[in-house]
Amino acid sequence: MKTKQIYFLLLSTIMFCVGCNDSFLEKQSESSLTKNTFFLSTKDLETYTYDMYPAIPYNFDDNSSDNIVYNTEGSDIESMIRGEVNAENKTKGWAQSSWSSLRAINLMLDNLGSITGDQSEIDHYIGLAKFFRALFYWSKVKTFGDVPWYEHVLENTDLEELYKPRDSRTFVMDKVLEDLDWAIRHMKVKSNTSVAGKYQVEALASRIALYEGTFRKYHTELNLGDATACLQKAVEWSKDVIDNGGFSLVDIDQYASMFNDNILAGNKEVIMYKKSSRDIGVGNNTHIVCDIYWAASASLMREFLMSDGSRFTDQADHDKKSYVESFDNRDPRLSVAIMPPGSYKIDGGKPHIIRIEFGGYPQYKFYPARKDLAWGWDMNYTDLPIIRLSEIYLTYAEARAEMGELTDLDLEYSVNHLRTRAHLPALTIDMANANIDNELAKQHSNIEGINRGIIIELRRERRVELAFEGLRKDDLYRWKLATNLIKFVPQGVYFPSLGAHDVTGDGIADLAILERPEADDATNYKGLVLHYLYDKNGKANTFYLENQNSGRIEIASNKNANRKFIEPQYYFYPIPTSEVVLNGNLTQLYGW
């Protein structure tokens, strides 16, 4: 026990030194400590990498995207498009503390000379560190574009490196792909899917390669060069996971349990997951997804197909369907993503009555299935998928399509497995290209070429399958479609009139929308949840109906704000002015 305490004391000392420097430029050398005292075995490497795992992205919402109609807490995107971000305030992710994780990674990679043990084990942890460095830089590039690349620990005497300008995005992302490629070739397969092994890293690497490939293809204004190499890597890595990873899709009746339960260990579809458990004191806040801070958008709801594979937007009066009618004969994944009428929250009682001030479509995906999984703030114990085989199928098909190489055999190999599970007809290239969805074509107006229709349908499938898994904002950014966030007004549920309405599906009214409070409301609408467009003094509420007394719910703050999206500036954040003053070579880009 005493040896173990000394061991973790050394680890704590190293991480303290790594994380508490006075500034990004003022670093102390820990190399002698690490080289001579700590990194002596593969167990040392394993333990050291534990603190790197928080860098692996996971999520249970799509805030900052068009999948959400309203979030009471706001979002990064909302701050940006309202013009509230500048180099003096609300800068993001450049503080010295945000670079300490890179230093920790490079510190390990720089000090392996005293390691003894099996070389394949050593290489596994080198690969793991390179993977975490790739994640670090991918996050930085997404935020700032061009960033300085460092692959060794910097000392106070390394003035040229410390004060160098940004490296180009292309250079940095090529280095990221090199790190990922090395990691994939050297890491071991892990049966425990809550830790990173070869296929977990390869799956996430395919996500990164697809992001960069499509970003380079669609952001032609940045002159980022050929996207093909990135897209080819996305195909190569996703195909290896599909062919050799041993994963397969769960049946549709098990679909919801991937998001609302704590049984992901051994799940055949989940490639990597974040374990939550009351026993180990690791929890989350998944209970907040359902009508506590935000609601899903009508835009997302409309994109789910009908159960026979036809489009919801081709139905008669689709834009006037009520909340209850919106769920009739739909792709079964809709009722997993958005709460269907008649559903109960885990605290029991009556069927849930939607909160129309948020928009009215409650997110259901990731909401805990049972009360015993939700004990309070940071005390929900549902497992969270980090990446699933479903995404790998979608990555493969999209990358092939963006290179102009997609075939119907590719669709059978990949995304048609998702459609089969949902009991939808198979997708074919000719069918998609001959019958383009006009509504989606408006949203994806920058797709060109004869395969425009199939790319649109692949994007639909991606949005539907991966809803609320934290990928939608990145998708809009890499496709150069963030302007959609202001071009298409966020909307919620449709109401044909003021007055009483059924939202639980039993034919009995549950809530009423009224113009303003009146004395006889309690009598005329007894037992209903009441909402008003104006208070008794005539002050407008936070929501309104698009046609004044009818229509979809819209949010007043969106109507009243001067919302705009400046390209390419708003795709990136500025470097803090203080850092630019400190290092004059760190010039602002993209209009900042």
Image: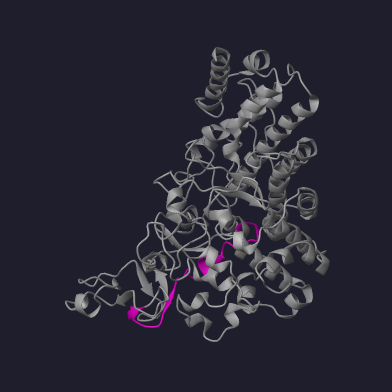
Q: Can residue 462 be seen in this view?
A: yes
Measured as percent of width and height from the top left, residue 561 is found at: 40, 64
- What residue is drawn where x is 77% and y is 29%? 123
The image position of residue 579, as x and y in percent, is 53, 36
- For residue 589, say whether it is visible: no
In the image, 51 versus 419, the foreground residue is 419
Residue 174 colored magenta?
A: no
In the picture, the quarter occupied by the N terminus is top right
> Quick check: 172 left or right of 92?
right
Q: Is residue 23 above or below residue 464?
A: above
Q: In which quarter of the image is residue 526?
A: bottom left
Q: In this view, does 576 lie above or below 219?
A: above
State which quadrant residue 115 falls in.
Answer: top right
**In magenta segment, residue 480:** yes
Instruction: Describe residue 527's horizontal placement relative to residue 507 as left or right.
Output: left
Write down the quadrant of residue 538 in the picture.
bottom left
Whole-percent x, y for residue 331 in the image: 60, 71
Q: How many marks?
A: 0
Is 360 drawn above or below residue 576 in the view shown?
below
Nearest the viewer among 432 and 231 is 432
Magenta segment, which residues? 477-501
Q: Decide: is 252 above or below 306.
A: above
315 displayed left or right of 414: left
Looking at the image, what colour scheme do you see? one colour
- In the rendered image, residue 41, in percent from the top left (x then y), is placed at 70, 20
